[in-house]
Image (cartoon, grey):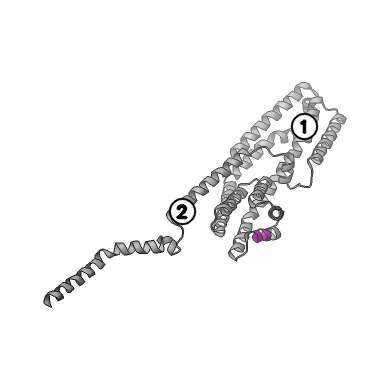
Amino acid sequence: MIVMAAILVTLALGGVAFAFAGGDEASRKRVQAVAGPAGKARGRGPAPENAAQKRKNVAALLKDMEKNRAAKREKPTMRRRLEQAGLAKTSPRTFWMICAIMAAITAALCLLTRQSLLVTAMMVFVVGLGLPRWVLGFLAARRRKKFTENFANAIDVIVRSVKSGLPTHEALRIVAREAPNPVGSEFSTLVEGMKVGVTMEQGLKRMLESMPTAEVGFFSIVMTIQARSGGNLSEALGNLAGVLRDRRRLQGKIKAMSSEAKASALIIGSLPPGVMAIVYITTPKYISLLFTERAGNLMLAACAVWMSIGIMVMRKMINFKH
């Protein structure tokens, strides 16, 4: 009996030692085999391998989008320029007719005032072709500036709508209905296109063509990545809104720092035409030789060329990339 009790005590002590010493690894393997990876079992997010693969997919998607955008980067047509300027209802034919009428009126005025052929040709070129295109560029730049000022607020509306449980299409519809133009008109075009079967990616490409700004490009990338690979849309758009506001803050800082250089360039560029106008008003006979003589016409042409080169150089010096 004493021997039997000793054997039983020894076996019990051995079992306890085995349980505490070698049972942890075996039990851990059994639990892992039943429950799977710890991250998936407890809902703590994707495994590191899946996160790395997702980052690779997003990087590949960004490279593909950049390649497609670089391949399709071409000079915009007149129809596209009219849309960018907010004149979508004006056809290119109407625009060229207006240019021809302005050129004809300018030519008639030059002939009535007995200007030389060179001056007439220059005035017709400037008024008939240069001035309308400059007006288009000015209107497009003003429209892009107004769009950028209200775009961050529109993204905030989308973020709040998505956080409140609304679908993305309904959030875009709210922006199209409530946001001021041109933000409202651009989102309205996007929503109307999606109603007739245009995909989100195609609609965003059209928006980028109509409003070619970096902000719209960022928005297009975020929405395309979210549609293809998933993710937290409200968080991504919230970060984008913060970035856009930081960009606007940086633009204001650059504008304030470069205001002195811009004022100097404006004064230097306006001095020669201003002095010529004053001389023409006070002593017209003294400066009329520039308009009546061939040598004077050539001097005027050379002055215009050099003044244009100087203005472009000064403009390049005072414009900062950001």
Q: Dot 2, crowdedness within 10 Å: few (<14), some or many (≥20)?
A: few
- Rendered image: mark on residue 50: 2
For the C terminus, the image quarter is: top right
Is residue 244 at least partly visible in the picture? no
Q: Residue furthest bottom?
A: 1
Residue at the spot 61% in from the left edge and 37% down from the top edge: 316
Q: Nearer the viewer, residue 321 or 212?
A: 212
Q: Position of residue 121 (x, y in %)?
A: 79, 28
- Rendered image: mark on residue 252: none
- Dominant secondary structure (helix, strand or loop) of the stretch shown in magenta: helix
Q: Position of residue 87 (x, y in %)?
A: 76, 46
Q: Is residue 154 above or below residue 274?
A: below
Residue at the spot 52% in from the left edge and 49% down from the top edge: 58
Q: Secondary structure at mark 1?
A: helix
Residue at the spot 49% in from the left edge and 48% down from the top edge: 56
Write down the quadrant of residue 287 in the picture: top right
Q: Residue furthest right?
A: 112
Q: Is residue 161 above or below residue 117?
A: below
For this view, does 221 lie left or right of residue 17?
right
Q: Is residue 120 magenta?
A: no
Q: Secondary structure at mark 2?
A: helix
Identify residue type, mark 1: Phe
Report the span colored magenta.
Answer: 169-174
Q: Nearer the viewer, residue 116 or 89?
A: 89
Is residue 168 at least partly visible in the picture? yes
Identify residue type, mark 2: Asn
Q: Position of residue 63 (x, y in %)?
A: 54, 43
Q: Nearer the viewer, residue 252 or 27?
A: 27
Mark 2–mark 1 distance (CA, rounded to whole Å): 62 Å
List the residue tagged with mark 1. Answer: 125
